[in-house]
Image (tube, rainbow, N blue to C red):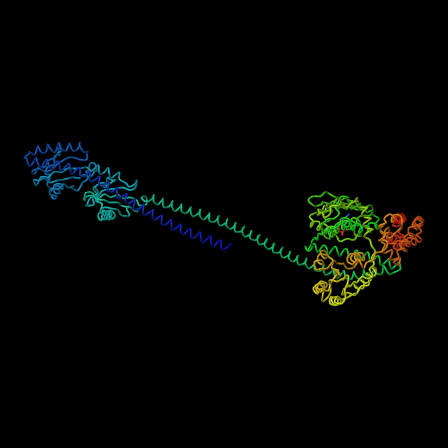
Amino acid sequence: MRNNRKTLVITLSATFILMALLVVYTTRMIYNTSYSYIHELGDDKTSAISADLENYLENAKSVLWVAADTVDHMVANGATDEEIVDYITRESANTEQQFDESYTGLYGVIRGNYVDGVGWVPPEGYDPTARDWYKTAVEAGGETVIVSPYVDAQTGNVIISIVKMLSDYGNVLSLDLTLSGVQDIIEKTQLNGNGYSFILNNDGMVIAHPDRSLNGSFFDDTEEGKALFDKAISVGKGNFNMNVDGEDCTVFVDEVMSQWHLVIVTNTGVLFKAPRNIMFISALINLCVFALIAVFYFLGDRYEQKMNKRIDEMKEIEQKKDYEAKLLMLEKSAADSANKAKSDFLADMSHEIRTPINAVLGMNEMILHESDDEQILDYASSIKSAGNTLLSIINNILDFSKIEDGKMNLVPVEFSTAELISGLVNSISERARTKNLELIVEVDDTIPSKLFGDDVRISQIIMNLLTNAVKYTEKGSVTLSVRNKGAEDGNVSLRFDVADTGIGIRKEDFDKLFKSFERVEEKRNRHIEGTGLGISIVTRLLAMMDSKLDIKSEYGKGSTFGFDLSLKVVDSDPVGNYDDRKKTVSRGDEVSLSAPSARILVTDDNAMNLKVAGNLMKFFDIKPITCSSGRTTIDMFRNNSFDILFLDHMMPQMDGIETLKILKSEGLLGDTRVIALTANAVVGAREQYLNAGFDDYLSKPIMLGDLERILKTYLPESVVSVSESVQNDDSADASDTELTIGKAESIGLNVSAGVEFSGGDEEFYLEILTDYANDAEEKCNALSKYMKAKDWKNYKILVHSIKSASKTVGASYISEEARKLEEASAREDEEYVVANHNALISDYRTLAGRILG
Ligand code: ADP
């Protein structure tokens, strides 16, 4: 800012100096031009006037010369004086007529006598030869000359005589002039209306002056007059400056016939008034121009300053934006690395948390199968349920973090539509039953039986929706419907909907659904387990499949979550009636497996995990060999062969993947199938293990069902034997009336647990199952009686026995209902018992009817 001021001052000063120089220069130029012009003008004027005067006098000279010549001839020819007087009288009259009145007549001296053309008679004693005019003529010889003037007493006019001596010496002719013409010229002569003029003769006598009183006087009488006269004489023709009558004057002078001096005196100030005015106006214009320039500069400077300020502001804004962008980038990279750290942390936690849970749940599974103490079994079942919930929460968090990190890839494979649906139904039916909810499954018959897609992720999506539907519904039903919307170009468009009659969602809460870790109506739902991740995972997975979630919900009445999916058709045979299929599938698939001759090696660095695995194998009559490191595993393979190797991934020194590599590279594997054991079962784990060369993977904690699936899939048929019920399974009709293991399973009982509780004896299990069903009516009536009588003590005892019996036969959802009623009756919570009693009675009776029916 200060710099700008300085620049402005310097620029303006420089401009001012330049303009001042310009003014001085132009002024001088104007002055010089005007000066010389005015002087030229003055000089021209004096020249013109002196020429006029010379003409005037030349005329007079000519007149005299002609007359003198004539008289000269007359004298020579002997003309008499009278004849000569006559002639000059006539000539005087002619001259006066011909010219003007200023010619006053001819006169002279002829043969010693005075002669006069106008009849003037000289006074007595008048000697013409003594007069100036006569003497001057004689002195001039034959030249025509002007005699010094004198002032006419009457007119005040100066009178001059022009004289010429004739050839006969002694004769002189003279002509008088009044000079009134000269006086007129002088009185009119000024320079541009400025000043005055006069004529002096060589003696300094005033010939003509506007002030007539001065005519005839001598100019050099006064000092100033003398100085002026001297200067005029010395200059001759030209001009000079002089103080005249106290004023600065410019004086122009010229000679007239070498006898007179024409003088024009002008006031210098007046003379140069016009150029001075021009100079003044020019300076004024320059000043105005300078002022304008200064104003423009100033305004320009202000505008520039304003613009500079704006530019500075804009720069500042730009810099701020840059800074913010950099900050954002830094924040983003910080967030990215924080996110990465979070994912790494979660991945690590996965292993760290899953390993102890594996141990807890594994041991718990053993308690459940080995303990006879009902109380202990009760505790163990609670541990199992809580442990499974914890696992599913961890799985959700891990899946979500994996998806967020972009590490999740879809792995499309061929899959059976019916298997996908029944897998989902099997997984959710138990929970729905526990909550006494009706599970309705509606599947279009026309859906192709084999499709191509990521069945694991599709299942995960639908399972999340089904789990929510069951979680947020207290009574009524949960419906899974799969509709065929039509096929095109080898693809089928399916519509999946999960509807419930639950609590519903307010419209204004819809947005919250999609926000990770955010739950709707937290207060109301706080007793329902959840992380707020389920829907987020669903929407993200659907986005990966080019689909999106539609939500319809009526608060208090229920919700429907649905989506469309386009999948490639592998086998377009229709899937057929789902209910019919369900029977066949469940009968065919649910096999109880025994493989005592199977050769199994389990490798894990954690002794507890080895123990759990070993115990679970017992269910299949398998005695596995265990190993605690990759190195010993390789050694084992050098001398032995195995049907399946269960190989832990995370091990110190040599991990599972390295071990597998060596086994393969050394050709030690043979026909052995290798299954990865991992606690790190996040999204993408399956692809990772398949890529690493494993045949499959088993997530820790190992679930009996999963283990069975693996054994069934990978053990050679020769070492597997299946239970009789399966072999007889084809006799579908029998199962409808006769109670068989298959029938018990189709009813939804946990048969394996029941058989286990029956000491592994299926016959015995079926026997106690029949008793259980037969007792139903009696027990239900008695229980209702106790409730009416508010006999809480007996109610508690009876409901406890129903709980234990239900658990023993594998009716866990009834057992659970009974457990809650037992607790309620123990604390005499009448309200709870009244509200839930009927559900238990109805479930027990329905189940009994199905067992016996
Ligand atoms: P959460 O683990 O809490 O169930 P989700 O992401 O699966 O998380 O669901 C987010 C929220 O959406 C839930 O907390 C619940 O309030 C609501 N919600 C989800 N499904 C349903 C449903 N079927 N009925 C009512 N509310 C639901």
Q: Locate residue 768: give its quadrant.
A: bottom right
Residue 374 x/y as whole percent? 89, 58
Residue 308 x/y as whole percent? 52, 51
In-image side of 318 versus 724 (left or right): left
Residue 613 x/y as whole percent? 80, 62
In-image side of 177 versus 244 (left or right): left
Residue 835: tell me if it is visible.
Answer: no
In-image side of 542 versus 134 (left or right): right
Residue 697: tell me if it is visible.
Answer: yes
Closest to the observer: 618 or 779? 618
Q: Residue furthest front?
A: 718
Q: How many marks?
A: 0
Closest to the observer: 3 or 120? 3
Q: Look at 10% across and 35% down and name the residue there.
A: 70
Residue 689 x/y as whole percent? 72, 59
Q: Residue furthest left?
A: 78
In-image side of 826 versus 171 (left or right): right
Q: Locate residue 59: give its quadrant.
A: top left
